[in-house]
Image (tube, rainbow, N blue to C red):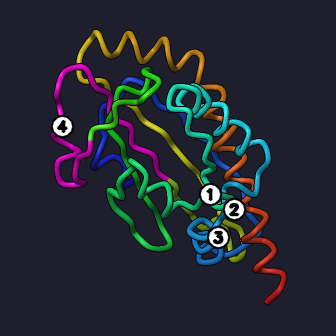
């Protein structure tokens, strides 16, 4: 898998998968086009995540009503690699346990070798795998590697609280992708 090229060693990993009654190309297309904010639950969770920053800055502005994988990869995450109709990998470097996140802008080229103390790197993929003529396995995996023991301890504490909500977001995203891919397949 492409994610292995960017993060073969990690401190935390979580993987989810779902079967979709649609061919690989429909599932991959749905992945690229899905509006994550179509899920009310995701909108609420993202709002709650931003709440402390909103109060701190007094910025009451909305993030809009659309959020796609492309939008995510333009908001701190970077596209690490994409193999069309196979796998897409995005990554981010930061201090996720802090309210601000202290996101460190790095290029895809420097992501692998980034090792500055006090940070964590996260790689997040979506992959599709044919399971028959019109059935596809859609999976997503998140991996996090911390750059030192101090950040590892901070991240693990943070992950104990946030990890379950992160899982909800990923499962909700996959349900949306499944719904859209199957709808597209039925309309053909």
Q: Which residue is mark 3?
A: 30
Q: Is residue 111 magenta?
A: yes
Identify the residue at the far bottom of this view: 188
Q: Where is 185 relative to 58, above or below?
A: below
- Label pair 1/2, CB-CB below 8 angstroms: yes
Q: Nearer the viewer, residue 50 or 160?
A: 50
Q: Which residue is mark 4?
A: 114
Other-residue count near label 1 (Cα within 10 Å), few / some / many at <14 / 14–19 / ≥20: many
Q: Nearer the viewer, residue 131 or 2?
A: 2
The span from disc 4 to disc 2 (Cα, nearest Å) is: 32 Å
Q: Residue at x 35, y 54 (%)?
A: 78
Determine whether the residue tagged by mark 2 lies in a helix, strand or loop. helix
Q: Where is 89 relative to 106, above or below?
A: below
The span from disc 2 to disc 3 (Cα, nearest Å) is: 5 Å
Classify the position of the N terminus by image quarter. Answer: bottom left
Residue 180: x percent and y percent?
A: 75, 69
The span from disc 4 to disc 3 (Cα, nearest Å) is: 32 Å
Magenta stretch? Answer: 105-125
Q: Where is 29 relative to 73, above or below?
A: below
């Amino acid at each position: 898998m492409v994610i292995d090229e960017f993060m073969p060693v990690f401190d935390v990993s979580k993987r989810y998968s779902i079967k979709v009654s649609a061919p690989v190309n429909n599932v991959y297309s749905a992945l690229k086009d899905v509006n994550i904010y179509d899920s009310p639950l995701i909108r609420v969770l993202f709002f709650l995540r931003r709440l402390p920053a909103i109060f701190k800055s007094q910025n009451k502005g909305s993030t809009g009503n659309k959020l796609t994988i492309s939008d995510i990869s333009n908001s701190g995450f970077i596209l690490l690699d994409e193999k069309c109709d196979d796998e897409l990998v995005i990554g981010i470097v930061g201090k996720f346990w802090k309210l601000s996140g202290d996101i460190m802008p790095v290029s895809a080229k420097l992501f692998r070798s980034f090792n500055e103390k006090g940070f964590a790197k996260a790689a997040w993929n979506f992959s599709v795998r044919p399971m028959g003529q019109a059935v596809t396995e859609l999976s997503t995996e998140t991996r996090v590697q911390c750059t030192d023991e101090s950040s590892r301890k901070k991240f693990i504490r943070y992950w104990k609280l946030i990890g379950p909500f992160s899982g909800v977001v990923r499962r909700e995203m996959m349900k949306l992708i499944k719904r859209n891919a199957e709808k597209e397949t039925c309309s053909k």
